[in-house]
Amino acid sequence: MNKTETEILGDSPKINKKYALPAQHVITLAEEASGFARYDGVRFGHRSENAANLESLYINSRTEIFGDETKKRILLGTFLLSAGNIDTYYKKAVIVRQKIKDDFPDEYARIFEREVRE
């Protein structure tokens, strides 16, 4: 029997669902941008055949393999990891993730005990 998140967590006082999804989104974008930075066409990823110099190799290689959604995610992730924003967004998201991780065992035990009684 599949249950929705609300049916499972109920009114969980510890797991704040309001902040969980935004935190996950911020962390995912930052990690994607960091990972995609390796795909430069020199050591990893597609290497463009139409490159006259190193700069055009980077630009052409990434332009040829990344779609619009990937480019958007790279830009947003890079923005989130930039010097002026890392404390404002990324570090706060990591704190939220850690809080959820720390609270999850207690909530899991509470949910499991309720399931066994039902």
Image (cartoon, helix red, strand yellow):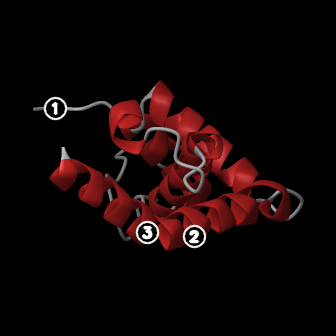
Residue 67 percent coordinates (x, y) = 42, 30
- Secondary structure beneath disc 1? loop
Q: Taking the image as drawn, is residue 8 in sight?
A: yes
Task: State left or right for residue 98 relative to residue 88.
Answer: left
Task: State left or right for residue 15 relative to residue 113.
Answer: right
Q: Residues within 10 Å of mark 2 (few under 14, many from 20)?
A: few
- Secondary structure beneath disc 2? helix
User: Nearer the N terminus, badge 1 or badge 3?
Assistant: 1
Residue toward you, 100 or 56: 100
Question: Real-space Cα distance between discs 1 and 3?
Answer: 22 Å
* Residue in the image at 55% along x and 39% along y: 73
User: Nearer the N terminus, badge 2 or badge 3?
Assistant: 2
Q: Amino acid at mark 2?
A: Gln
- Which of the numbered marks, if any, corresponds to residue 106? 3
Residue 102 percent coordinates (x, y) = 52, 73
- Which of the numbered marks, if any, corresponds to residue 98? 2
- Where residue 47 sits, quadrant-wise, is bottom left
* Residue in the image at 60% along x and 51% along y: 13
Q: Amino acid at mark 3?
A: Asp
Which mark is in front, 1 or 3?
3
Seen in the picture, residue 70 relative to 77 is either above or below; the reply is: above
Q: Taking the image as drawn, is residue 50 in sight?
A: no
